[in-house]
Image (cartoon, helix red, strand yellow):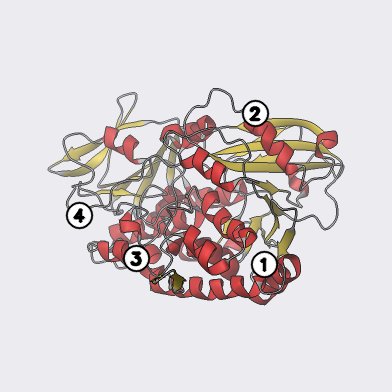
Amino acid sequence: MARIAVIGAGMGALAAAARLAVAGHRVAVYERTDTYGGAVRRWERDGFSFDTGPGLLPLPAVYRDLFLKTGKEPLEDRVELVQVDPSARHLFADGTGAALPNASRAGVVAALDEALGAGAGGRWGDFLVRAREAWDRSRRPLLEEPLWPNWRVLAEREPYPAVPHKRLLRTRRAGTLAEVAAWELRDPRLAALLESHALAYGLDPRTAPASAALLPYLDHAFGTWYVRGGLRELARAVYERCAARRVEFVFGAEVTRVLEKDGRAAGVELSGGAVAEADFVVAGVAPRTLERMVTGTAVRDGAGEVEPQHGLPSRLTVLLALRGGRPEGTAHRTVVHTRDREAELDAVFGTPPGTVAHPTVTVLRPDDPALVPDTGHEAVTLTATVPAGTAPDHGPLAEAMITAAERAVPGLRERLLWHEVRTPADVAEATGAVGGAIPAPALAAAGGRLLHPSNTTGVPGLFTVGGWSHPGGGLPHAGMSGALVAGLIVEGPEFRGSQ
């Protein structure tokens, strides 16, 4: 039985802790804040309750597997999973809209043909077939196995089978998601639909590789799910699974240093000077935070290592308390597309970043009595991708988001009791990431720019977990990283992922 110190109580760290405890190890989690879950938080006021991190769960099989491998109670015995249908309603800049059924290619094709005109659905359906091929080609090495030592194979090989595009005398294939949208979908609304998936994950579709086609494919193939009571309930369930497996939690405990002995990790030192010895250390923190904790040895040895990602955007969240109940038949998720996508992308991803005047806004309207004081009220959450860092005043952008949301929520202003704004600074406080940056999921191609550093490090016995290491950001990816780290510790370097 090994002693294992886990730094941080984010979802990836919790997933690793539960699996390691079940394997017979003595696990202690040190979290600098007063609660668990990382970015998966809840905000409450006047009987209203809101998720301030992710609001929907793609690929729930990752957490089903976690509960299966760590005890007899399945995930559905601990939380109520609800499949969201339609998966999303999209309101485009030209005034058209489309509601897309959940996990139904035929249904999506029909809905897009009806909303956008004959042929639109077929082009989207053909795109999904190619996206599935990209998924089949990259799934295991990208998500389910430790990062290959020869990871450059993933960096150089584009798994998306782009359609040849003739332009003047040349034949080209799309190399970016924006080129896939322009050359294969050939409709500005379908382009907005595709590119909104990248933007929601903090990626610029103009530079994101074509392999980012995986992002809408995951929604299509595995469905979009909601956890009754909010996504915070998923964090609670994973935390309780850890506690049931005798994982020790120490909250309000900031780790300042990773201890080393004989060239390997040997424990952690806390801000008050206390020391906790360990045989392994698992760090679920952002790269720059970890670098400050390790002295004398490079966390990344530089020999063929993927560089940590920096400069990613953040999220602005506006929480709306509305009088009046949620109307029957309301879509759970509506995406209100910007009328000037190029200006939005320039503002979010420019150097330096600018002010987002007309953001793409995701409107979440859960049908969940647990979130409101009574049936005569509704809790609505708005989110937009924004530059990371501290802005002088997010008020104008929040107002722009509310204005955009009026397209999805008729009479919103008249129903509004109050609103609360959660900024990148709040994300930074919850996660410790500089400027509240949010890590993107790992993607193949693009020279490895969107891969993440391996879960092993240049310090033997020190492992990294969560969105800032392989396989990247997002709730499913965090759960996968926990499984990979547990496998590497339990089985050793020969571990090659679950079969």
- Which residue is disc 4 drawn over? 304
Residue located farthest toward the left when viewing the structure as drawn: 262
Instruction: Pinpoint residue 235: horizontal percent, then vertical percent.
Output: 55, 48
Instruction: Pinpoint residue 153: horizontal percent, then vertical percent.
Output: 27, 66
| Residue drawn where x is 58% and y is 52% of the image | 234
In the picture, the disc for residue 102 is: 1
| Residue drawn where x is 64% and y is 59% of the image | 189
Separation (CA) of disc 4 from disc 3: 18 Å
Front: mark 4 or 3: 4
Front: mark 4 or 2: 2
Q: What residue type is labelled 4?
A: Gly
Looking at the image, is 108 positioned above or below residue 454? below
Q: For the residue labelled by badge 1, is the local secondary structure a helix, a strand or a loop?
A: loop
Q: For the residue labelled by badge 2, is the local secondary structure a helix, a strand or a loop?
A: helix
Horizontal side of 220 relative to 143 (left or right) equals: right
Separation (CA) of disc 1 from disc 2: 34 Å
Separation (CA) of disc 1 from disc 3: 28 Å
Horizontal side of 462 relative to 339 (left or right) equals: left
Q: For the residue labelled by badge 4, is the local secondary structure a helix, a strand or a loop?
A: loop
Q: What residue type is labelled 2?
A: Pro
- Which residue is disc 2 drawn over? 396
Front: mark 2 or 3: 2
Q: Quadrant of the C terminus?
A: bottom left
